[in-house]
Image (cartoon, coloured by chain):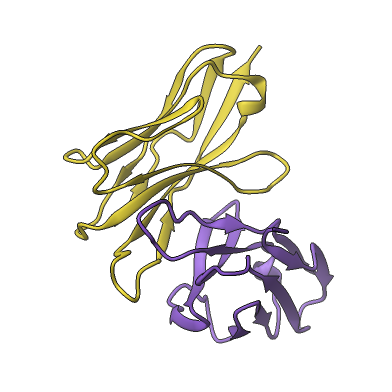
Chain colours: A yellow, B purple
Amino acid sequence: AQKITQTQPGMFVQEKEAVTLDCTYDTSDPSYGLFWYKQPSSGEMIFLIYQGSYDQQNATEGRYSLNFQKARKSANLVISASQLGDSAMYFCAMREGWRDTNAGKSTFGDGTTLTVKP
Amino acid sequence: DAGVIQSPRHEVTEMGQEVTLRCKPISGHDYLFWYRQTMMRGLELLIYFNNNVPIDDSGMPEDRFSAKMPNASFSTLKIQPSEPRDSAVYFCASSPRFQGSSYEQYFGPGTRLTVT
């Protein structure tokens, strides 16, 4: 079974509007971290935002926020006031069991390609 | 900090040749990861190390692939012999251990491997 599911292969958004990129995850470990990365056409992987499984509040980083719904096992990325430079592939990822010595294994979703229209 | 350094950035080789990809993680990071990215299979975790020790190599596709981390500042991913289906972008990433805050992975720029 997929551990990270991103159901939207591609998304379009008008410049200056907000957009939500979906991510659901599957784990039985109570300790995990959820991450979003951006990969522009140049190819580098850029870290955007992190949410820990025990964090009480949703993470925010500038125009990025993470809508964390633990019971639903979802960690959607919200980008407010989209800019043309936001056009890229976005990956959701999870790291499990960070409290164990073998912690650290990460799983990435298939990604969502976001296109911002002027 | 210079970030994660990978070399070479591009590699073109012929089928059957040995290929060695290199990675220098960020100083002080405990974890090192090797990923492969292709259009067909997306981003796959090949292997990861914790304090220079391989923890999980279940993602390594076959015996032709091997990875080593002889010290905290250097790792290699070797493919021998290479095949056209190995063509991909190979990323190295490192991260600190969890210490009460985020422990995101920092990715290198990747090595684009083409096997003809």
Image vertical order of residue A41 relative to residue B104, above or below: above
**Residue at horizontal 43%, vertical 46%?**
A35
Judge by depth and name the residue closer to the eye, A49 or A86. A49
Image vertical order of residue B12 relative to residue A17, above or below: below
Q: Position of residue B83 (x, y in %)?
A: 69, 75
Left or right relative to B72: residue A27: left
Image vertical order of residue B98 relative to residue A112, above or below: below
**Of all residues shown, which one is farthest toward the left?**
A71
The image quadrant that residue B88 belongs to is: bottom right
Q: Quadrant of the N terminus of chain A?
A: bottom left
**Residue at horizontal 39%, vertical 52%?**
B101
Left or right relative to B88: residue A28: left
Left or right relative to B77: residue A20: left
> How many numbered dots are placed on residues in this image?
0
**Residue at horizontal 60%, vertical 20%?**
A116
Q: Position of residue A37 (x, y in %)?
A: 52, 44
Q: Is any atom of residue B69 visible in this view?
A: yes
The image quadrant that residue B56 belongs to is: bottom left
Left or right relative to A75: residue B92: right
The image quadrant that residue A57 belongs to is: top left
Q: Is any atom of residue A3 visible in this view?
A: no
Q: Quadrant of the C terminus of chain A?
A: top right
Q: Position of residue A27 (x, y in %)?
A: 24, 56
Q: Position of residue A42 (x, y in %)?
A: 73, 43
